[in-house]
Amino acid sequence: MLEPLKKNMKLSDKAYHVLRNAIVYNELAPDDVLTEEKLCAELSISRTTVRVALHRLVDDGLAEVRGKSVTVSRLTEEDAASINVIRRPMELLTINELRGRVTPMLIRKLRNSIEEQQNCKMADADDYMYYIQQDYVFHTALAEATGNRFLCDVVERLNTHSTRCLILSTTLLSSYKPAVVEHTAIVDALERKEYDHAYQAMDNHLRQIEKRYIDRTERKKLE
């Protein structure tokens, strides 16, 4: 069941965000067909509005056109590797762009995100979703603080796909505690204005994400 549409937003934007979240959190799985008629009925919106939302999902790489159908896109091991190749330099560029831009408000927002992650009991799907939402908040907050909207757009899109990788790879239970430690190291360095250390901490975080994904993928092959 898709989440209800929120108020104070264009209908096409609402539909897009509902479908985007459903795909990212695997409520709509790879290869699921996104049928216009069904989505119109579930979301109580017009076919034109649904079509606009589907076009945006295709543009984002979250859905793809197969013949006359639109389906949720797949994510292969090669896709995950390609995402990491692009994500690392963009996130590291973010740290470099934060030199002289770190404010107490940013530090508070980052620390709050970490605290929210630490408080997640990881007992059910709602906990998993909230933890992942806070992970997204952490990385996009860093990008937003640079003041570069183009960098922010790229980082947001990459983190959307990285979130899908995290969920589909089922590495979350083994990675959520180390990731919090890694986030804390980044914020500690930024708060001290030790930007080189923050850069190294982010680089380590991204490399550990990739390592955890590869390790889990290799284990699944042996199961």
Image (spheres, helix red, strand yellow):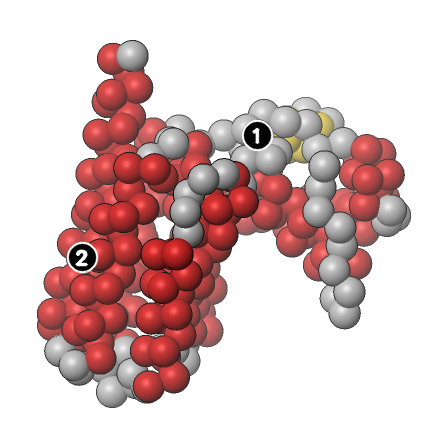
Say whether residue 104 is left or right of residue 154.
left
> Which mark, residue 107?
none
**Residue in the picture at 86% in, 49% down:** 45
> Image quadrant of residue 28?
top right
Question: Residue 56, position in %: x, y?
Answer: 64, 50
Name the residue carrying label 2: 203
CA distance for labels 2 and 1: 30 Å
Residue 62, position in %: x, y? 55, 41
Residue 118 vs residue 20: left or right?
left
Badge 1 amino acid: Ala
Q: Secondary structure at mark 1?
A: loop
Image quadrant of residue 210?
top left
Q: Which secondary structure lies at badge 2? A: helix
Q: Which of disc 1 and disc 2 is earlier in sequence?
A: 1
Q: Residue at x 42, y 43 (%)?
A: 122
Task: Read off the residue under disc 1.
Answer: 29
Most foreground residue, 79 or 211: 211
Q: Return the x and y of residue 87 as percentages of the image width and height.
A: 31, 53
Q: Is residue 12 visible?
A: no
Q: Residue at x 32, y 86 (%)?
A: 103
- The quadrant of the image that shows the N terminus is top right
Residue 126 appears in the rendering: yes
Q: In front: 158, or 1?
A: 1
Q: Quadrant of residue 189?
A: bottom left
